Image (cartoon, rainbow, N blue to C red):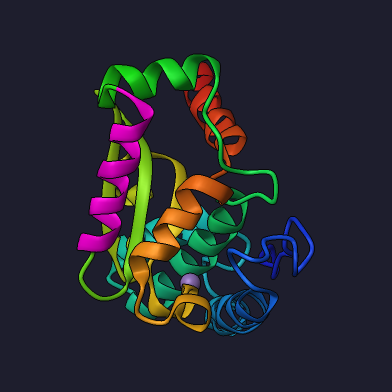
């Protein structure tokens, strides 16, 4: 069995006051854990058992195996989310990623505005992503457990806009949660690593 419930990459209170320890305790310790806890018995003794999460979610999606897909994709999406935020986040991207942001969006303020519009515009539960496509950078939103990995895009970073991600701290003010992510938490270093890894592979 290759699937495990991962630790957070920082302390439970490290994102205070923008994401409280109460939220992280519930979001990581209960929501994320429950996706992993449901996935493990569902894949035991199946062809998925020893595969990587990314392989499982793609294969389950292809096979129309919705239960396995939802739990595998959500397990994957949440691990990616924790790394998309950092206690030393915010600020500006550097080097090649900064150039790519400017080339695609004009400037960082325009990137933030477009990301925020996408995050506010996602009706109901879902995710907003900065991705690298065949044509360059893009911002996309996906519903429920859906992930850009299904469409051949390379995720650079993501924000969870399910209500469970922000309701304890921001109630219905999704816009304030998005602003805090973009100005204080966004992990440009992680995005740059994903961008660079993709460039190296291309
Ligand atoms: Mn979530």
**Can see residue 55?**
no
Tell me which secondary structure the magenta stretch mostly adopts: helix
Instruction: Tell me what residue is drawn at x 64 percent, y 73 percent.
Output: 20
Q: Position of residue 143 (x, y in %)?
A: 27, 66
Q: Give the tally of numbered discs.
A: 0
- Image quadrant in which the N terminus is located: bottom right
Residue 137 to residue 6: above or below: above
Q: Position of residue 168 (x, y in %)?
A: 52, 83
Relative to the observer, which residue lies in front, 63 or 39? 39
Residue 51 to residue 44: above or below: above
Q: Position of residue 113 (x, y in %)?
A: 28, 43
Instruction: Tell me what residue is drawn at x 52 percent, y 35 percent.
Output: 191
The answer to whether 12 appears left or right of 163 in the picture is right
Magenta region: 107-121
Relative to the observer, which residue lies in front, 112 or 63? 112
The answer to whether 58 appears left or right of 88 in the picture is left
Residue 115 colored magenta?
Answer: yes
**Can see residue 5?**
yes
Instruction: Tell me what residue is drawn at x 66 percent, y 81 percent.
Output: 22
Residue 158 colored magenta?
Answer: no
Q: Residue furthest right?
A: 11
Q: Position of residue 174 (x, y in %)?
A: 35, 69
Relative to the observer, which residue lies in front, 186 or 151? 186
- Image quadrant in which the C terminus is located: top left
Instruction: Tell me what residue is drawn at x 47 percent, y 22 percent.
Output: 97
Query: Which quadrant of the view contains residue 176?
Result: bottom left
The answer to whether 100 appears left or right of 38 in the picture is left
């Amino acid at each position: 069995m290759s699937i495990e419930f991962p630790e957070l990459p920082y302390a439970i209170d490290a994102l205070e006051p923008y994401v409280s320890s109460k939220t992280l305790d519930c979001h990581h310790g209960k929501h994320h854990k429950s996706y992993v806890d449901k996935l493990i018995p569902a894949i035991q003794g199946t062809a998925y058992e020893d595969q990587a999460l990314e392989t499982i979610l793609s294969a389950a999606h292809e096979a129309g195996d919705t239960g396995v897909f939802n739990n595998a994709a959500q397990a994957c999406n949440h691990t990616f989310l924790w790394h998309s935020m950092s206690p030393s986040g915010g600020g500006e991207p550097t080097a090649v990623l900064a150039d790519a942001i400017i080339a695609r969006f004009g400037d960082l303020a325009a990137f933030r505005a477009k990301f925020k519009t996408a995050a506010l515009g996602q009706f109901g539960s879902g995710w907003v992503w900065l991705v690298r496509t065949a044509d360059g950078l893009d911002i996309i939103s996906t519903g429920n457990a859906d992930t850009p990995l299904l469409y051949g895009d390379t995720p650079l970073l993501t924000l969870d806009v399910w209500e469970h991600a922000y309701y304890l701290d921001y109630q219905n003010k999704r816009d304030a949660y998005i602003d805090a992510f973009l100005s204080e938490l966004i992990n440009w270093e992680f995005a740059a690593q994903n961008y660079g890894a993709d460039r190296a592979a291309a």
